Image (cartoon, helix red, strand yellow):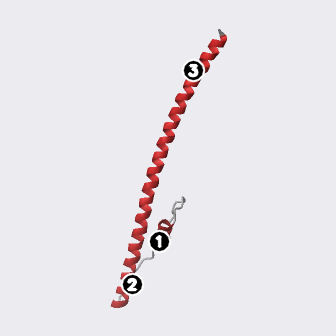
């Protein structure tokens, strides 16, 4: 009788562990899906940063030429270092500007 009771307890424990395992797998799957979505969005944002950085360089070149031709002094801002880093690297470290 004690062996049967012990066996029943083990079966109940197995059932609880399987349910917990199922919940953990669902949590892992959800977290993995979020990671994939964030990584994809991050890649899009990096591509946008690269494109906008190139546009900014082009506009700065146009301003430089216009400044030289007209003789007027234009304030041409430098491209922030963090834009260079974001466009060129895939670092896991955040940009601290």
Residue 64's tag is 2
Give me the C-alpha separation between circle 3 and circle 1: 61 Å
Between circles 3 and 1, the one closer to the viewer is 3
Residue 88's tag is none
Q: Position of residue 14 (x, y in %)?
A: 58, 24
Q: Position of residue 96 (x, y in %)?
A: 52, 63
Q: Is residue 1 above or below residue 67?
A: above
Is tag 3's residue or tag 1's residue first in the polypeptide sequence? 3
Q: Position of residue 45 (x, y in %)?
A: 42, 61
Q: Is residue 1 above or below residue 79?
A: above
Is tag 2's residue or tag 3's residue first in the polypeptide sequence? 3
Query: Is 52 displayed left or right of 27 in the figure?
Result: left
Q: Position of residue 50 (x, y in %)?
A: 43, 68
* Residue projecting furthest to the top: 1
Mark 3 surroundings: few (<14), some (14-19) or many (≥20) residues within 10 A: few
- Identify residue for label 3: 12
Name the residue: 50% across, 71% down: 81
Per the image, label 1 sits on a secondary structure element best described as loop
Task: Give whichever of 3, 89 is nearer the camera.
Answer: 3
Per the image, label 3 sits on a secondary structure element best described as helix
Snapshot quadrant of residue 91: bottom right
Between circles 2 and 3, the one closer to the viewer is 3
Give me the C-alpha separation between circle 2 and circle 1: 17 Å
Name the residue: 60% across, 18% down: 9
- Identify residue for label 1: 80
Asked if disc 2 and disc 1 are in contact, CB closer than 8 Å, the reply is: no
Mark 2 surroundings: few (<14), some (14-19) or many (≥20) residues within 10 A: some
Query: Is 10 displayed left or right of 50 in the figure?
Result: right
Snapshot quadrant of residue 48: bottom left
């Amino acid at each position: 009788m004690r062996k049967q009771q012990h066996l029943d307890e083990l079966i109940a424990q197995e059932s609880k562990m399987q349910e917990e395992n199922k919940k953990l797998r669902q949590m892992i799957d959800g977290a993995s899906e979020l990671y994939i979505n964030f990584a994809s969005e991050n890649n899009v944002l990096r591509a946008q940063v690269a494109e906008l950085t190139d546009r900014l360089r082009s506009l700065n070149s146009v301003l430089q030429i216009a400044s030289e031709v007209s003789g007027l002094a234009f304030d041409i801002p430098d491209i922030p270092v963090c834009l260079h880093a974001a466009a060129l690297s895939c670092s896991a470290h955040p940009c601290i500007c």
